[in-house]
Image (tube, grey):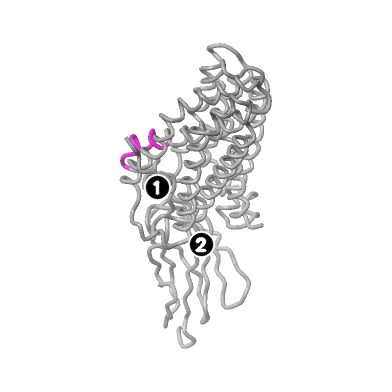
Amino acid sequence: MRIPTLPLALAACLVVEAAQAHAHLEKSTPADGSTLTAAPATLELTFSEPARLTALSIRRDEGAEQAVRVLPTAAERTQRVALPALAAGTYTFTWRALAADGHVSSGVVRFTIAASAR
Amino acid sequence: MPPDALSVLLRALSFVALLQAAGIAISVTLFARHLAGVEAEVRRLGAWSVAAALPLLSAQLSLEPARLAGAYAGVIDPALERIALTSPAAAAFAVRVLGLALTALGLVGRGAPARLAACTGSLLVAASFALMGHTAVHRYHLLLGPALTTHVLVAAFWLGGVPVLYLATVRSAAGSAAQLIAAFSRVAVWIVPWLAIVGVLMAVALVPKLAVLLQPYGWLLLGKVLGFAMLMGLAAANRSRLGPAVALGATRAFRRTLAAEYVLIVGVLAATATMTSLYSPEP
């Protein structure tokens, strides 16, 4: 019996990769790239699978990055983090999360609070 | 170097050392009577592979808090250390260390107990890969776990077998080396296809969609497929022409293809480490 090598090779390699996937960000609130008229009280990150938020930092405009110290401790699909009072500006949130499968994923969420926001 | 990049490097190196240690132990167990003249050297190489794997695995686990933080400062964060030590990565580390310990016993010992230790150790090393990733959390994990273990075990057999065959062609008489090559080929022809067959079965269960081929994950995957196809070509050439020629003293071409196989396998493992550390199969 002749075994079709290339299709099987593709499938074989797919196996090892698919067996070790990550939690990726499906959506955030505020949404990435959005402009807000009011400062949000929380940041909500919804992942493709339950994940534990292990790091979150905030940077306003070109300022210094500041770590958010208090993070949820449970692994959930949606993670909610209380935010300090945010002034107008463009914010960059850099996150890291650990999925139940043991892999670490990371990403960035950016949004702008309009100058007229209170 | 960012923590993620260092983690990928350590992971790739640990994959090579782990699979080589396990594979050499498998070769010693299966082909002991064909290792005349090189057995001691092969066992030493296996032991060195175990010795190389342990600090690589330890460094990789130690780096996990830094990966969780996204910065090296994470390694001194007690909260992140706790998370790392209770993660699937830590479980995989523990099983790998146990597997390596048994493998080492199998490599330094003799007789049935040593062979049992070598087999058990190699099996644990392979099974540790099923403790992380989607295989571990999938609803069919009781089927996927053994499938992935089989996949890794066959890869270990191949990677560990290459240096064993190489040493045999350098140190042993042509006749002895040819017998080892023939024995290895008789086993390989049956088990290497399982590397792909198991892959097909698992792909049906785990692969979401082919759109990933248009992303970095997919590019690395296609690179791996190409590497794997080249490996099969080299293996076929070794089995049909170059391996049998060793009996006549023609070893240079065979050793060259063995070296190429080793480099390709290491490349495939490096791609695997990169993909599974940094990217996702979801488009």
Q: Which element is circle 2 on?
A: strand
Q: What residue type is labelled 1?
A: Leu
From the viewer's perspective, is A9 left or right of B173?
left
Query: Is residue A2 rendered to the left or right of residue B118?
Result: left
Residue B208 placement (x, y as % from top left):
33, 54
What main secondary structure does the magenta stretch of the protein show?
helix
Residue sitting nearer the eye, B31 or B137: B31
Q: Which of B241 and B162 is in front in this view?
A: B241
Give the magenta range. B139-149
Mark 1 / mark 2, whichever is N-terminal: 1
The residue positioned 39% from the left and 42% from the top of the image is B135
Residue B194 x, y percent position in the rendering: 39, 34
Residue at image position (53%, 58%) is A55
Query: Regarding mark 1 in the picture, which secondary structure is present there?
Result: helix
Question: Looking at the rendering, in which quadrant would you find the N terminus of chain B?
Answer: bottom right
The one of B256 and B12 positioned closer to us in this rendering: B256
Check the picture and name the quadrant holding the C terminus of chain B: bottom left
Q: Which residue is drawn at 58% across and 39% down?
A: B257
User: Is B175 covered by the magenta stretch?
Assistant: no
Relative side of B268 to B137, left or right: right
Outermost bottom residue: A116
Q: How many numbered marks does the figure carry? A: 2
* Picture coordinates of residue A59, whole percent (x, y): 57, 72
Whole-angstrom CA distance, mark 1 to mark 2, is 39 Å
Residue indicated by mark 1: A6
User: Please, what is the three-letter code of the amino acid marked with disc 2?
Assistant: Trp
Label 2 sits on residue: A95
User: Where B155 falls versus A24 (above or below)?
Assistant: above
**For this view, does B21 lie left or right of residue A19?**
right
Asked whether residue B83 appears in the rendered view, the answer is: no
